[in-house]
Amino acid sequence: MTSWRQTWRLLLGIGREIGVVVCVLHVLVVATSFLGPLLLALGLRPLVDGAVAGDPRRLVVGGVLSGVALLLTALAPVGYRWAVVRMRERSQMVVQRRLLTLSASAPGLGHIELPAYRDRLELLKQRTDDLADGLTLLAIGSITALQLVVTALLLGRLQPILLVIPLLAIPAVRLAGHAERLRGAADLRTAADRRSAKGLFALAVTPTAGAEIRVHGVGEELVARHAAASRTRHRAVEAALLRSVAATAGVWLCYAAAFLGAVVSVLRQVAAGEATGGDVAMVLGLAAAVVGAAGQLSGQAGSAMRVRTAADHYRWLEREACKHDGRTAVPPDRLVDGITLDDVHFAYPGADQPVLTDVSLRLPAGAVVALVGENGAGKTTLVKLLTGMYEPTAGRIVVDGEDLSNVDPDGYRERITAGFQDYARFELAVRESVGVGDLARMSDDRAVRAALKVAGADFAEDLPAGLDTPLGAGWDGGAELSGGQWQRLALARAAMRPWPLLAVLDEPTAALDPHAEHALFQRVADGARRGRADGRITLLVSHRFSTVRMADLIVVLSGGRIAECGKHSELLARGGLYAELYNLQAESYR
């Protein structure tokens, strides 16, 4: 019962966001499709008997009831096209916003990398229509049940044995719920196969992957893998459905037999002079209405199970996204001591081997720190820990004496800034694409232009509409940028916040040539040194050793461990790993 209560609370919350008027209209439109057959059945008896007996009063009553039934039937498609379609469109947008909120408000990224998270997210995206239907299930289910009871009572008055027909709805409802449970379990088991097929399709139609697919001739391999994943999913889902079809078919055969029995019974009454032609018409109409209502009720039972499954997926995602809530410590206004990593270990969720091991390091307040190492050394992972995207598997990170795991993540993020190697391409106006780096100053053109200057993104002013130019060729008047230009805008975003505690540039210049990278890092380092008074730590991450020699402290990572630390001159003098890698790179540029 707890799960059902939580499901209804979720649905009511979604309903408030969709709008009460749309929800009510949706209920009314769907209800008309149930009320029409019942009114028609009730109208047929006085209509037929009135015609036979020449009774105008019964003819009027039957004509009115039948006319209302036909009017409802005629108007139902019109209402469906507006209310039902609008309901589903709005529900999809509401659920998408809720998922965006869950993703954006989560304190870290660990849950997003869980295969189970991705599977449930994919299943939930498929079931947004179910959530829309679920909002009205309680009201519509009550109407259907009432229709079934009224119809059963009317049939029972004509012939008590006919009460058997409505009772067949009970096994039909139970079997429909069982069938949906089987299908939901099969969907969850094969969610990874569905994601695989979807990913292969997306890969095959992506222009950036098109060249490699053709050069390496892997088109047929992608098709074969897609077919294999599809077959695995279809077999599991269809097997689950087939297990319930046989039993369900048995119930509907019973309905057919009961319907035939009702017809035979009433015809016998007519032959014995105990029933009229109107009774025959009414029994046929009521029996058909019972079968229709029972079918609707069993369908609603299946829908209810689908809604509950979708709600369970949503709550699972919500729990994973909010696992680390409750951090209340306030980050400092400025760094005095710095950031200390104390025996930090880290392994990604589900991984057997740690990425970082025994990392102990102090980043002094006001320092420019360079983090270097070969690919796979753990540089980006260390950056994610310092920015609070993950928590250490063991050990701790201390910010001016406060354990980072206790610090409010939103407050901490407001006090740091970063430019990442895998940058986002915000297809907004230039001003907005850069301004999201500091939302409070997004409309401040002076701040945006200053950030563009730091990033060396002077090209932005030369775009057709300057800072108002929309980015992306898919928009009217949109400008398509090169990889290097997009990267410079990402760097400009990172320069928007004026007084961060920590400013991270994680391989932010992969699309730039060595001279442009060196010039950029030089500007960043010069700006950081001018701002030493605020205690800011500037962390530069690069695989090019020549560009980070100006740093106050160089940290060399190797195999997830700190190999050595020191200034450029000190590390060269030691003749260790840094000197070896530096000299190798220097040789390659000669």
Image (spheres, rainbow, N blue to C red):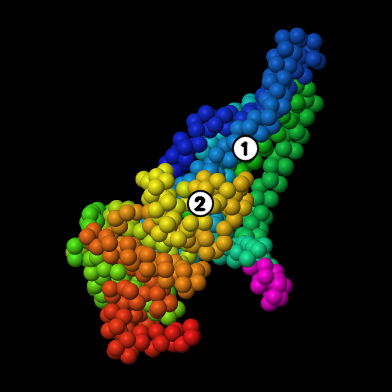
- The image shows residue 429, relative to residue 493, as above or below, that is above
Res 85 label: 1
Note whether residue 536 is visible: no
SS for dot 1: helix
Depth check, front residue: 83 or 163: 83
Res 461 label: 2
User: Quick one: label 1 or label 2, which is nearer the N terminus?
Assistant: 1
Q: Amino acid at mark 1?
A: Val
In the image, residue 473 lies at what x, y percent?
Answer: 62, 53
Asked whether 219 falls inside the magenta stretch, the response is yes
Depth check, front residue: 160 or 87: 87
User: Which contiguous range is marked in magenta?
Assistant: 209-226
In the image, residue 318 lies at what x, y percent?
Answer: 41, 53
Residue at the spot x=67%, y=37% of the render? 292
Q: Determine whether, in the image, residue 500 is placed left or right of residue 137.
A: left
Q: Amino acid at mark 2?
A: Glu
* Helix, strand or loop for the magenta stretch, by majority: helix
Asked whether 35 falls inside the magenta stretch, the response is no
Note whether residue 336 is visible: yes
Q: How dense is the environment of label 1, judged by Cα within 10 Å: few (below 14), some, or many (20 and up)?
A: some
- The image shows residue 208, relative to residue 374, as above or below, that is above
State which mark lies toward you, 1 or 2: 2
